[in-house]
Image (cartoon, helix red, strand yellow):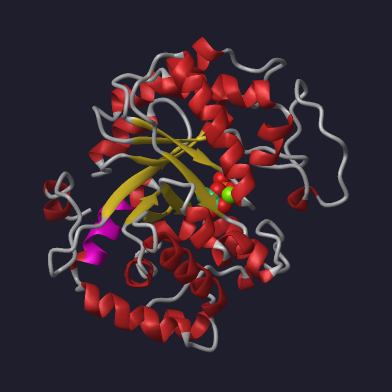
Amino acid sequence: RKASQRANAQAECRLADGTRVEVFANLGRVGEGALAVAEGAEGCGLLRSEFLFLDRTSAPSEDEQLAQYQAIADELGGRPLIIRTLDVGGDKPLSYLPLPKEENPFLGLRGIRVGLIRPELLRTQLRAILRVKPYGVARIMVPMVASVTEMITVRTMVEEERLRLGRVEPIQLGAMIEIPAAAVAARQLAEVCDFFSIGTNDLTQYALAMDRGNPAVAAGVDALHPGVLGLIRLACEGAGAHGRVVAVCGGAASDPSAAPILVGLGVRELSAAPAAIPEIKAALAAFTVNQCQALAERAVQAQGAEEVRALTGASA
Ligand code: PEP
Ligand code: MG
């Protein structure tokens, strides 16, 4: 790592023309927050809360969850902490959460669908998040949202728990865009969300009909496929119609060559692996927003991910 990058780690991320882009970190357990801040994270854009739920015989209690979320919030020193509600499914069975055996677990009960059929589990997690101090630091993010109805149901639960806990101000509630239909219908979804965060890992797998974990198709699973970029653009347009911010928290956000394209499509927050943050900030500082938009336009019209990667001057 260059000394200049280390020295500048705490600087906020700006494009060459001063346009602000927030660079957050993806976290997966207690202890990673301090490291992420040292790398220059401006907050946590995705806390994968699964670590609390896996490899145990009963669900974590509200107090147990709160202790872990609070520890991470403290590590972040007042920076935003976006906590994703439990994202498990038939492919990751939990003994205390019996789910039917499914032929196609990736098209079955996973993400928020599990929370909606087990509302006590979801409400316990929502209460723990609502109790993180100082109030306002923690935000709630919902995985695998397919419809406006799901988001309205979750919001109703959040509001009920918030009032029960006596929190006066609303809490920020966002949807992950991981399902192509949610990207296409983003305008309607944005109306009932405070923010979007695009999960490019799942969005790419579902858009291309390629299992993200299947080595036989791994070479084709690229978020820079023009069709996936077109979905990201639709998500940004839908969000923009309601003044909502769009983040990317999937793997594409950790790819320095993807960053200017994502910003050109309208993304204003990237949540990356902590170690990738200095490089992402440096990559963005070389572009103006107009250059990002011109690059994005060419990327969306390219023939394939290979051509997009050639545009960025990098290979996968
Ligand atoms: C994604 O799908 O891009 C994402 C961030 O969620 P996960 O990788 O945890 O499925
Ligand atoms: Mg996902």
Residue 155: % across, % down:
53, 35
Rendered residue at 57%/67% (across/down): 184
- Left or right: where 238 falls relative to 114: left
Tell me if residue 279 is in the magenta stretch: yes
Q: Report the side of 28 relative to 172 (left or right).
A: right
Q: Is residue 249 visible?
A: no
Q: Residue at x 16, y 44 (%)?
A: 10
- Can residue 209 be seen here? The reply is yes
Q: Is residue 7 left or right of residue 222?
A: left
Q: Magenta segment range?
A: 277-284
How many numbered callouts?
Answer: 0
Magenta span main SS? helix
Depth order, front residue of 61/186? 186
| Up/down of 191 relative to 139, above or below | below
In the displayed structure, 69 sits above or below 226; it is above
The residue depicted at 49 percent of the width and 62 percent of the height is 187
What x and y, as percent, mark residue 263? 33, 67
Q: Is residue 143 magenta?
A: no
Say which residue appears at 49% left-offset and 69% top-offset: 234
Left or right: residue 51 compared with residue 167 = right
Image position of 180 with respect to 7: above or below: below
Percent across and percent down for residue 170 are 38, 30
The relative height of residue 172 versus residue 190 in the rendered view (above or below) is: above
Question: Residue 309 location, x and y as percent?
Answer: 44, 79
Quadrant housing residue 255: bottom left
